[in-house]
Amino acid sequence: MYLTTEARHYLSSDAAFDSLLPISIQQLSTQHWTPLNVAYMAAQFLAPDANARVIDIGAGVGKFCIAGACVSLGAFTGIEQRKNFVTTGNKVIKQLGVDRVKLMHGNFMELDITEYTGVYFYNSFHENLVFEDALDNKIEVSTELYEQYTAHLLSQLIAMPIGTRLSTFWLSITEIPGCYKLKETHFNDLLKLWVKEQ
């Protein structure tokens, strides 16, 4: 993909990317946004060709999707519950002129993820277990929601077709369905790359 000089600059480091964001959102970066080196590796695994369609569950400002579209030929969609994050992310996408990225406002429970070929999951449900780690107070968090979200995600992963690729980062869910085989781990086992084989 062709990248403008501006896009190459902002995607050259996490600090450069963060500078695109409002200060209040920049402050969430270290704990909540995927580091670019992780995003690039995960995206290349999830989108090995132009037919790949990747969904990021709990996409924040879309950093993973933006980075992914810049290092692969696949299409990236992020879904995020916080409307201000989606608004900010869409401004960044437009500013950088990145193709094949869609960031939408919504709850992943309302989305059928089985139409995608790859799934990226960066521990989006954690704030429902450890409330002090919540990104803000704009959405409801609870242990009941954690259980609902986890059960729904696992059922969707089981329903995915064979060959589906899954990338998890800082995973708090203790069990990935047994139909997924772990292919690679990176960054001290924080990034795990899986393929559904049965």
Image (cartoon, rainbow, N blue to C red):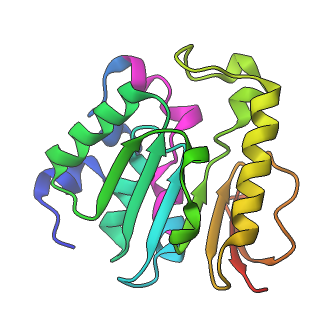
Q: Is residue 114 above or below residue 161?
A: above
Residue 183 in percent (x, y) is at 73, 79
Secondary structure, magenta segment, majority class: helix
Q: Position of residue 165 (x, y in %)?
A: 61, 75
Seen in the image, is 156 located left or right of residue 19? right
Residue located 43% across and 78% down the image: 52
Q: Which residues are magenta?
A: 24-41
Give me the residue at 36% from left, 47% from top: 103
Quadrant in the picture for residue 144:
top right
> Where residue 27 sits: x, y (%)?
46, 22
Q: Which residue does the image show at 51% across and 54% down from the upper left?
A: 56
Residue 35 magenta-drawn? yes
Assign the C terminus to one quadrant of the image: bottom right
Relative to 5, residue 53 above or below: below
Find residue 109 and report its horizontal and vertical position in percent: 61, 45
Q: Is residue 196 left or right of 115 when viewed as pictured?
A: right
Residue name at image x 59 percent, y 33 percent = 31
Q: Quadrant of residue 86?
A: top left
| 147 in relation to 9, above or below | above
